[in-house]
Amino acid sequence: MPELPDVESARRRAEHAIVGRRIVAVATRPDPIVFDGVSPRRFARVLRGRRVVAVRRKGKHLWMELDERPWPLFHFGMTGSFEIYRAPGERPRFWKVELLMEDETRLAMPDARRFGRIRLQHEPERELPVSGLGFDPLLGLPTASELRAALAGAPARRGGPPARAAARDREPGGGGGQRLGPLSKHLALPPPLGEGRGRAHRPA
């Protein structure tokens, strides 16, 4: 499964390969699971002729800012990735979409197990699923007090205190939840005795 550094690496490679270039053709394969809320045909029609202005990421979601909205939003799931190449014969197995740029660079998203998602959105950062993510560990960490407040206000899931439920969530921090579990539990604890709670009891 791609982790945050893998997704950020894919973003940087895509940024280098396609930003500033126009999409001249879009090939898609029919897949009603991976294409979420948009048909492959409409997805191709919307992107064709658009220029890529930027490639952004939050958590494990990536999107391309185009010179016109809506914009494509990608999530790799377990086996998705971006593959960049030039020759048509290099098209990867299990590809779902392929963008052909004006300089003949090609970018494809393969997804063998079909857990990835491809969407069209007008404002990805303000729409679900991206708007529901917490902080991004690679873009900036919150302070301890901000994280404690966020965990304390998280809705309970599967029973138990809110903070523990949030710690079990895989993406409370935009995809870094698995690494933050122990930290979340520590920050959810009350302050030690002697720190704002009076003096610690000393045994006689």
Image (spheres, helix red, strand yellow):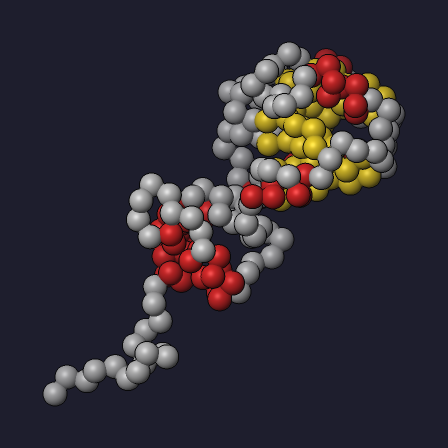
x and y percentages locating residue 132 in the rendered image: 56, 43
Q: Is residue 126 visible?
A: yes
Q: Is residue 196 left or right of residue 101?
A: left
Query: Which of the 4 quarters of the picture holds residue 71?
Result: top right
Query: Which of the 4 quarters of the picture holds residue 5?
Result: top right
x and y percentages locating residue 142 in the rendered image: 55, 60
Q: What residue is shown at x 51% (from left), y 20% (from top)?
A: 113
Query: Which of the 4 quarters of the picture holds residue 29?
Result: top right
Between 142 and 20, the one lying in front of the other is 142
Q: Is residue 141 above or below residue 87?
A: below
Q: Is residue 100 left or right of residue 154?
A: right
x and y percentages locating residue 78 in the rendered image: 51, 29
Q: What residue is shown at x 31% (from left), y 44% (from top)?
A: 159
Q: Is residue 70 left or right of residue 50?
A: left
Q: Is residue 54 above or below residue 39?
A: below
Q: Is residue 6 visible?
A: no
Q: Is residue 188 above or below residue 75?
A: below
Between 28 and 6, the one lying in front of the other is 28
Label count reads: 0
For the C terminus, give its image quadrant: bottom left
Q: What residue is shown at x 56% (from left), y 58% (from top)?
A: 141
Between 63 and 82, the one lying in front of the other is 63
User: Which residue is farthest left?
Assistant: 204
Q: Is residue 204 left or right of residue 87?
A: left
